[in-house]
Image (spheres, helix red, strand yellow):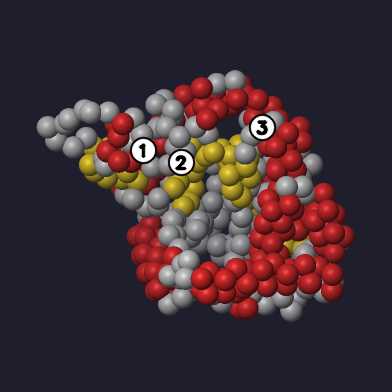
Amino acid sequence: MAGQFAKPRSNPIETVNGVEMPSFRGDNINGFEATPESRKSDPRRLIDAYFHSAATLNYLRSAISSGLADLHSPLDWSLGHVLDPALKDQYQSIVQNLIDTLDFMRATGSSSGQELETVDLFTSHEGLLLDYEEALTREAPVSLKSTHKDASSNLHFSSPPTSFYNTSAHFLWIGDRTRQITHAHVEFFRGLANPIGVKVGPSMPASEIPPLLDILNPNLEPGKVTLITRYGADKIAKCLPEHIKAVQATQHRQAVIWQCDPMHGNTKSSSAPTSVTSGASSSSPIKTRHFTDILSEVRQALEIHRSYNSYLGGVHLELTGEPVTECVGGAGGLTEDDLSLNYTTFCDPRLNEKQALELAFLIAGFYREGSTTGVAASSESVAN
């Protein structure tokens, strides 16, 4: 689970109703309200962000212990929003197969069920504010079992080796705007023992990836670095093959994890009139994303990785469990005219709980069937 209270912005200054002021950069820097006073940076917000993060983690621990992740309750996955009968039958078949599998495991005694009732949940965010991240970085002993080279050796230490861990999250990533190899973020991240990610967009030349990997993972530790690609559905076919080939030509080819972010490259402005809950003016264009573009980028990523004998290890999605109307499309048939119903984001548009579940079903189908053609075609026709 990832989240962040800071946001990189292309322009540090914006003009609202003729008044020039700093751009909103996230709740742990300044306020969303479009006034010069609200937009002043306030370091006390960093403390607020810490306590909000701690409260969220405590809530998650409580929810998981109460059965939130229990796979024995798939009927809670409501499919009432799916308008197309054929697609609804397809999703219901997946749910029924899961129920049948769980019943079989219970009947044969092949599982105690405990491992299916909970999950190991890890946290993540973009390591954007280095003042915040440095304050939460600690030197701690390294478990030899967690280091692939030392674990296989007979080395003995008079005292346990130590390394630096960022304790604000398990996994942090470097954004597409801050990945320059001579800049501060890469310098900070190269000293961390945490697994880390790097956002890779269409502006990144393939030639820059190998030296970046050399800096961040000089010991070729498998899984140390995840490359999170975020091109856009109309650019991935051009960019991803070159980036895959650049990695495959290096020693990092067996160490890198690839992940697809189909959200950030597919953000568009909507001119539909709306009065959004987040406070934007009804006359201002608001950001949205189309479900078909998101699905298309995931599908293309899978196909391209397969064609280059590579492997897509995960997806990076922005979603919420709330019934927001920020992304259009999906089996529920949301259109741009529906954005005003419940548009609450202060930054980027998110998939709602129905769209996220639908996308999960479709991605599972891609992997299960080994071919993306049939499922993608049927889902795109419904989403359109």
In the rendered structure, which amino acid carries the disc numbered 2?
Answer: Ile
Q: Amino acid type of disc 1?
A: Leu
The structure residue drawn at horizontal position 30% and vertical position 41%, both measured from the top left corner, is 145
Front-most of residues 150 and 223: 150
Q: Is residue 125 visible?
A: yes
- Does label 3 or label 1 sit earlier along the sequence? 1
- Counting from the top left corner in percent of width and height, residue 315 is at 61, 50
Q: Is residue 105 above or below residue 289?
A: below
- The residue lying at 40 percent from left, 73 percent from top is 65
Residue at 49% x, 32% y: name it.
255
Decide: marks 1, 2 in contact (CB < 8 A)?
yes
Instruction: For residue 117, say whether it is visible.
Output: no
Going by the numbered disc 3, the residue's amino acid type is: Asn
State the image quarter where residue 123 is shown: bottom left
Residue holding disc 3:
309
Q: Which residue is mark 2?
A: 196
Look at discs 3 and 1 and give the one toward the viewer: 3
Residue identifier under label 1: 192
Task: Report the front residue among 179 and 116.
Answer: 116
